[in-house]
Each structure stands twice: as C-alpha cells, then as structure tokens.
Amino acid sequence: MISNDEISNNFSLLAKLMDIHGENPFKAKSYAAAAFSVDKVPTPLSEMPKNSIFSIKGIGESAGNRIIEMLQTGKLQILEDIIQNTLPILKKKKLTNRVDIFIEKNFFEKDAGKKYLAEFQKQGFDITIHANQLSQSGGAELAIELKAKSADHVIQLSDETIQSFGKSEVVTVLLPAADLYMKCDYPQARKLIDAGATVALATDFNPGTSPTQDLMLVGLLARLKMGMTLPEVFQAYTINAARALGLDAEEGSLEVGKKANFICTEADLTDFFYSAGAVPKHHLFIGGKQVKV
C-alpha cells in the first residue's frame, strides 16, 4: 500500500513539473500545498475512510481524488503522463543532462526513487543520488545498482557497501561542510579510498544546510575529520570531481587534448587546506587564459 510519504512526494514532484510546463500556477501551488498537508497527517491515509480525506485541511476536491487514485492503484497517472512529456522537453532544450533524487525517509523511498531514476536513464539522462546522509536508506546501494554518476553525502555506509563502491565506477561526493553545519557524522573517506572508491569533494553550497563556498574549509575538514591526505584532497577536487560530472574526458587533469585549467603559485603545496580561511596566493588559468581571482 502506498505510504503518506510517497503520496506527498508525488504531489511535490507533480507541482514542480507543472511549473516547468507553465501550467496554471494556482493548480501547481494547490498540489504543493497538498503535499505539505499530507506530511502533517499522523495517520496513514490508507487507514482513513475515503470521505474523511476531503476534510483534511489543505486538501481540495482535486487533490482528494488524486489521493484516492493513488491509494487504489499505487500511482498517480497525471504524474506518469507529465513525466513522459517533460523529459523530452528538458532534453531538447538542453536544460539539464542529469537528474538527482534524495533517497531518505520522508523524501523518496528507495523503490519510488528507482522507478523514476530508471525512467530518466531510459530517456538518456545521467543520474546522481543524494544518498545515505541521515540513515542507511538504500540510496547508496541503488546508486551502485543503477550505475549513477555519483552518490552524494554517503555518511551512513556499511562496510559491505563501502567495498561495493570500491568495485564500482560511481563517484562518492563527500560534503563535510554540510556535516559541520548539520552536526552530522563525517563520511568514512579513509575507508572508501582504501577500498578503491573514487572520492570527490564539494561544498554543497546552499542557504539551508551548508551556507559556505569555502573550498579551503572543505579540504581542511577532509584532512582533519575524514583522514584524507593532501594529494587525495587535490585529486578529489580535480579529476575525481570531473568524473562525478562526466567531464573527465575534457578536464580535471593536465593532459594533451584536455582544457588547460590550472593554477600557478609560489606557495608550498602544504599551505593548501591547512589554515582555515586562508587561500594561498595564486594565478588562475581557464582554457589556457589567465583570469582574475
């Protein structure tokens, strides 16, 4: 039986896709509001009398009928249809080449996420998964199963899953600044690297859980809290980051035929990712041309 979380997720996704299509903004907002309302219901909707669903604050007639449809069929047909119509538009207009889903309780459950991600791959999109940040949600394992470009956060990992990452081509993108702000555990970078996994680093910059663009801070945390060496931090920021984005054939390392993106510095390499807030003086070159920093 479909859960409240899945119903809420379906409404949220429907609202976002309707907005992309430029459909009636009031209708899109009504589904977004319905998702919020469903999140507040303590009782499984599947256990409630059908008529009582329409009395839930924030659930109108249209949303109520959609809920009943999902309870009876396990899916939301209007969402299935709009996904089929949306993906070709995103591809044709080159609005994105990848899709990300957050696999976690109260967000997308593993099975629901797999359904959508498989469809995105079928349409030619790369996928990445926000995985195992708060719990062993199954997102990391799903990333390996579907051969995602990357699995991001990946804090809560079993030893078995760490070994599986070591045998896969999925890049584990670690975001220690988010863990600092959210007071989470730090990812097991040392175990991942020793297992042969590809590790990249990023800031996870966003105003809610990681309001920083400080690459030096992230590198410092990687060294202090995650057991990474200085060369491993440089590698995580360059070729491994390029692999996570599917750009490693074009950049990420200094090789003939690749873009000449690099820095020149008189500082010792040991000055990098050492002192919080300090950025060693350097000259930045993008495409072989110096740019101001």
Image (cartoon, rainbow, N blue to C red):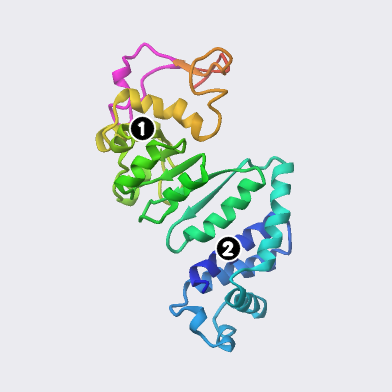
Is 190 located above or below residue 52 in the figure? above
Q: Which mark is residue 12?
A: 2
Q: Which SS class for mark 1?
A: loop
Q: Position of residue 218 (x, y in %)?
A: 36, 35
Is 276 located above or below residue 105 in the figure? above
Whichever of labels 2 and 1 marks the residue nearer the N terminus, that label is: 2
Q: Which residues are magenta?
A: 264-284
In the image, taking residue 288 as reference, residue 191 lies left or right, namely: left
Question: To which quarter of the image does residue 164 belong?
Answer: top left
Q: How many marks?
A: 2
Distance of label 2 from label 1 (alpha carbons): 37 Å
Task: Mark 1: give few (<14), some (14-19) or many (20+) Cα within 10 Å.
Answer: some
> Which residue is depicted at the point 59% across and 84% down?
54
- What amino acid type is highlighted by mark number 1? Gly
> Which residue is depicted at the point 50% across and 29% down?
242
In this figure, which residue is indicated by the disc labeled 1? 196
Is 247 located above or below residue 5 in the figure? above
Closer-to-camera residue (220/52): 52
- What amino acid type is highlighted by mark number 2? Ser
Q: Is residue 68 magenta?
A: no
Camera sees residue 176: no
> Which residue is depicted at the point 47% across and 50% down?
142
Q: Position of residue 161 (x, y in %)?
A: 36, 46
Q: Position of residue 119 (x, y in %)?
A: 62, 52
In the image, taking residue 289 as reference, residue 155 lies left or right, namely: left
> Which residue is depicted at the point 73% across and 64% down?
24
Nearest to viewer (mark 2 / mark 1): 1
